[in-house]
Amino acid sequence: MSCLVKSNYSHQLSSTAMAMCSSFCPQIPNQLRARPICPFPTKPQFTLSVKAFSSETSNASSKDGMSARIGFLGLGIMGSPMAQNLIKAGCDVTVWNRTKIKCDPLISLGAKYKSSPQEVAASCDVTFAMLANPESALEVACGEHGAASGMSSGKGYVDVSTVDGATSKLISGRINATGASFLEAPVSGSKKPAEDGQLIFLTAGDKSLYELVAPLLDIMGKSRFYLGDVGNGAAMKLVVNMIMGSMMASFSEGLLLSEKVGLDPSVLVEVVSQGAISSPMYSTKGPSMIQSTYPTAFPLKHQQKDLRLALGLAESVSQPTPIAAAANELYKVAKSHGLSDQDFSAVIEALKAKLQNPPK
């Protein structure tokens, strides 16, 4: 395959030319078509375009064509649609998941399968990982038969999981010790943005790897930010999710209060959606919350995990976060009511329980 990369590859990985691919775009003018640097002769070549870049790379004008085999580890709510978008774009994708049955739909679309993260990493140039929590991310990367065991010089590992900075640095150190490159790239967005290729990537780590995987990020997302050293991407994601979790808790209070005083909560959703505090989250989640249904786009247990990690981050720099701390307690109550696997908007049920069972 051949790909156009909208970046200046002044620091390409020296030992192995890795390749990126994006969506078909036969209308690209001839003068913009790239010269393949190291194409695989067995792969058919096609011309590609890349979606809009974030500000730090938007002025890049140098483009090169390259080829790569892409690995994807973790096929849950987020990982499966992300990998599917890569496959639909024509990328050579190899997948792995603890439960193999989750790989089957992607295999039917053309993905290859390997039985361990180690085998995926060994057979691919760039490997992505989307795991549920820091423990899983560390185990898949560094455990027995983990991806690090299959990494070597010239390969790249991109962890798009949401983890704390310390975990990201541990994984980075293990990957770098093999001679491979590491990029953390947690995403802002949930199930629907993942399906639509509208995620926001918050990246940090090896800049050359970032530039090389940029076209792949652009297949899966609508924007991307490079934030410097490993840990910064993780920190940014935790801050974003801390804000989001606190907003949802406050929104839940508002919906219940409006109903309690005799107002129509559906009208509240409309009013909020037209004002200064308008948020797609409110207009998307509000109607189903009023109906007490919570189709899972972002599991409540993951929101509580992110709040816990954000509070730990705040503690490490002595930053008071009283609102987030209160929200975290509410999500813990929701978990105790068996709502862990429901959407995080189910946190409203914790408030209902408190209202139904006031302290004596």
Image: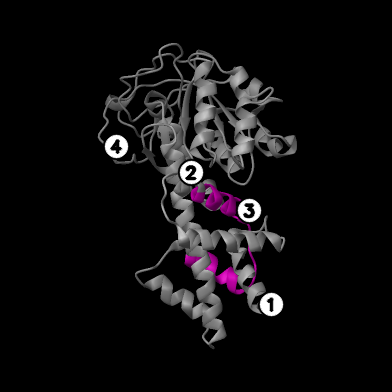
Report which residue position mark 2 lands on. Answer: 187
Amino acid, disc 4: Glu
| Label 1 vs label 3, nearer the camera | 1
What residue range appears in magenta?
Answer: 282-311
Task: Quote the CA–CA distance across marks 3 and 4.
Answer: 34 Å
Whole-Å distance between the Cαs marked 1 and 3? 23 Å
Question: N-terminal of the two: label 3 or label 2?
Answer: 2
How would you rate the neighbour count of disc 2 (Cα within 10 Å): few for under 14, some for 14-19, many for 20 or more? Answer: many
Task: Measure the C-alpha gap from mark 4 to mark 1.
Answer: 52 Å
Q: The residue tagged with tag 4: helix, strand or loop?
A: helix
Q: Secondary structure at mark 3?
A: helix
Tell whether label 4 touches label 3 (CB within 8 Å). Answer: no
Q: Nearer the viewer, mark 4 or mark 1?
A: 1
Residue type at mark 2 is: Val
- List the residue tagged with mark 1: 357
Residue 104, placed above or below residue 77:
above
Q: Residue at x 50, y 51 (%)?
A: 311
Residue at the (49%, 68%) spot, across then down: 250
| 105 sits to left or right of 41 | right
Name the residue that disc number 3 marks: 301
